[in-house]
Amino acid sequence: MTEHTDVAVVGAGFAGLAAARRLRSAGHETIVLEGRDRVGGRSWTTEVAGIPLDLGATFVGPTQDAVMALAEELGCVTEPTFCAGRNVIYWGGRLRSYSGTIPRLSLRELFNLARVRRKLARASADIEVEAPWTAAHAGELDAMSLQDWLRSAGASASTLALLGIASRVTWGAEPDAVSALHALRYVKAAGGLDTMLDVTGGAQQDRFLAGTQQIAVKMADELGDRVRLGAVVRRIEHSDAGVTVSGNGFAVQADAVIVAIPPQHRGAIDFSPALPDPYPRLTTEWPQGRLSKAYAVYDRPFWRADGCSGEALSDTPPVFITFDVSPSPDGPGVLLGFIDPREFDALDADARRASALQGFARLFGEQALSPRDYLDHRWSAEEFAPGGPTAAVGPGSWSTLGPWLHKPVGPIFWAGTETADKWTGFLDGAVRSGYRAANQTAIFRS
């Protein structure tokens, strides 16, 4: 049976739902088609030991105004991420403590890191976020990887290793797989490296005790039966007369469609007629990164009694960065670990658990080996729309494909955090991209 609506939306993540919600408030009818059996996209909250834990997007911070305003409107409250006490770092076989974002290094290492960070800030300042390919040295920057750029900037081995951790947690990729132009644009879109990486005053400052997915659930509840789960879109036929969006057992005719999924996943949809060059190349040259997460739940946050914040860095896989996401000082205590997926993802469940807990114990002691519960999630192992937190855009892609990333094709509009011009890759970027696509679509229909 074919249904009719004003605008079809593909994807019920933050971008798609934000777009549908804005369109509806402006008087445009929508139908949202989601292939999964849940809303939220890469925001997914589950429960472990009765505690809501985010398997995907977790944190929010100042200047992420779009998602924070949306959360407030929907009654979703935040609390500060715990960060009091000593941070720890396991580096070169040694465990040390430090305060702030930068770990304790030798004076020579600190000087090198500071110098490279200054160079990165100066280089990103010259990038126009909306059109990075227009920068004076865009071609040169896009031809090299972030690792190439860091080496050209004189980065020492310790600086390369520390910024390698930042690359893994940001893009789910090693620095040699990410375009230098992409990295510099991304940093500027987040307001700078400090804003992107810090807890206090940065992107990890706050979190939602009930999880981030509640925001998507509440948006979907407002839209009601206009959100269709298990509706895998296989084909989009488009012409000057509008679009027909179809899959197994459904078809939706509309004036326009907003495709609110990552560029890589657009490749699973058959567009008829085929999208003009170079749009199809985005599906292969704008790939999702790979990132996994692990949680260990304890009776109490025992590391706090030792004066530790729960924040840690490690150069030994699989756990490379941790946070304390305990719901209360009295317990339970919850450690969140970001996991290097390269070897971890191929292990069976028991081996993954043992490996992650050993990583926690390396940082916080033998007590970490005996949690009362444990959970991990491998985003690259997802059967539907797999991939990490955002796109890991490789060398050569921005200068050749950037202008087409979210440029409409007739009645087809694009959304998703990868297409955002501020806070790209974050929940805030997803919401902003949904609003942009909704505004473009409303103008198109007027």
Image (cartoon, rainbow, N blue to C red):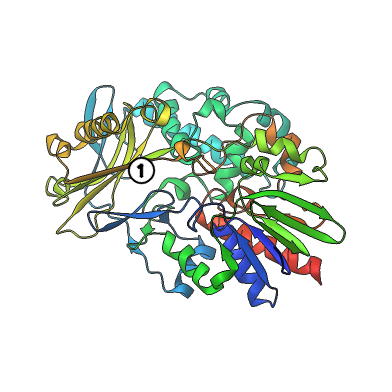
Quadrant assignment for the C terminus: bottom right
**Left or right position of 263 against 370:** right
Q: Residues within 10 Å of mark 1 (few under 14, many from 20)?
A: few
Reply above or below: 59 against 362.
below
Pinpoint residue 61: horizontal percent, then vertical percent. 44, 58
User: Label 1, on which residue?
Assistant: 101
**Left or right position of 365 against 198:** left
Reply above or below: 79 against 109.
below
Quadrant assignment for the N terminus: bottom right
Outermost residue toward the right? Answer: 240
* Tally of marks: 1
Pinpoint residue 161: horizontal percent, then vertical percent. 41, 27
**Left or right position of 245 against 109:** right
The structure residue drawn at horizontal position 66% and vertical position 68%, both measured from the top left corner, is 30
Q: Is residue 69 visible?
A: no
Reply above or below: 114 against 61.
above
Nearer to the camera, 185 or 276: 276
Nearer to the camera, 303 or 58: 58
